Amino acid sequence: MKKKISMILILIILIASLSGCKKDKYNKYSDSFFDTFDTIIQIVGYTNTEEEFKSYVEDIHERMLVLHKYYDKYNNYEGINNIKTINDNAGKQPVKVDKEIIDLIQFSKDMYYKNGMETNIALGAVLNIWTQYREMAEEDPKNAMVPPMDELQEANKHTDIDKVIVDLENSTIYLEDPLMSLDVGAVAKGFATEIVAREIEAKGFNSGIISAGGNIRTIGKPLDGIRERWGVGIQNPNMSIGNNESNVLDTVFINDASVVTSGDYQRYYMVGDKVYHHLIDPKTLMPGDYYRAVTVVTADSGEADFLSTTVFMLPFEESKKFVESLDGVEALWVFKDGSVEATLGMKGIMKSEGATGSKSE
């Protein structure tokens, strides 16, 4: 799998270029780790001392490690029932799990019913086939193939989210269909980031950014004495990854909010000259084909992660109407020809439309 770290690189650039002189008693620090959710997790923030900052990073890291294990569908961990445990017991028995898993599954079901049926954590049987073909393509690119539609359609018979049974009283999850499989990849990283952000803020970390791949969650405002809002770069999907500002399509200025991007350039394989990416449309069972990328901005990182996939799967007029029906949600679309559209509220926080993060604004 191709793991993209473009958002992290852009974030590093922006923080370096937008931060000013350190004032008062706050200093800027940064740290990162690369052993959770298959991506680099970077933390940037302002604290009184480096020791204080490192303490917050340690807490974030430890929590992310736990959540990574909970939401992992590939590996078993001693003493932990996780997503893989639930899948392994499909059609057999309910699995008792910790609250963080119950919360994620219930959140994903609620969002599915509330926001249409474009993002389905029960689509695992279909996504597993795409993963198999992508892995075969990476091993033997010359013989890369697209999964047969009849195979995908057969798997799609086992994706009914109503058969994901959540028992809140007994803290269990049960998959009624023995051939179904959960895949929480469209929401888990953002959901985990939101959990960690709220918990670390409650511990006193009140000025920072947690960047988990394409998921950015800001806490408070930058305490550099100059800016009132954080600047977060949006990756240009038509530019190669690199440590320079030409890869930034635009910059949005936010506080206490999340920026999540879903794009066709993040995980994919080639069959001939055609790209087959990992964002699979449940209607067609093929990769979504409307955009290169969409970016969603809203307060909650879990919601932003979930919604970015949903927005990516809808044709533009429907997609825009959907976003505009939601309170506190903004979006930006990058089309295949490189053109860009954005909601009115998104334009209000974009650098290209005159927004800044300075105090004077």
Image: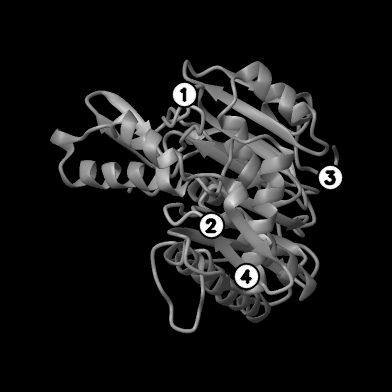
Q: Secondary structure at mark 2?
A: loop
Tell me if I can see residue 20 in this picture: no
Of tags 1 and 2, which is closer to the observer?
2
The residue pinned by badge 2 equals 176
For residue 114, above or below residue 121:
above
Mark 1 or mark 4: whose residue is earlier in sequence: 4
Instruction: Give the Cα separation between the discs numbered 3 and 1.
Output: 41 Å
The residue under label 4 is 172
Residue 172, percent across and down?
A: 62, 70
| Camera-nearest residue between 69 and 352 | 69
Label 4 vs 3, first from the N-terminus: 4
- Can you tell which quarter of the image residue 316 is in? top right
Q: Could you tell whether 79 is left or right of 164 in the image?
A: left
Q: Residue furthest bottom?
A: 79
Q: Which residue is mark 1?
A: 289
Q: Label 4 amino acid?
A: Thr
Q: Is residue 253 left or right of residue 145?
A: right
Question: Alpha carbon of mark 1 to alpha carbon of mark 4: how far?
Answer: 37 Å
- Mark 3 vs 2, N-terminal side: 2
| Residue nearer the viewer, 259 or 187 | 187
Residue 15 lies, in percent from the top left, at 61, 51
* Callout 3: SS: loop
Query: What residue does disc 3 label?
Result: 359
Foreground of the two, 232 or 160: 160
Task: Give the answer, above or below, for where 2 lies relative to 59.
Answer: above
Residue at (46% x, 31% y) in the render: 237
The image quadrant where one finds the C terminus is top right
User: Which of labels 3 and 2 is toward the front?
Assistant: 2
Corner quadrant of residue 312 = top right
Mark closer to the chain start, 1 or 2:
2
In space, the residues marked 1 and 2 are separated at their CA atoms by 32 Å
Name the residue furthest right: 360
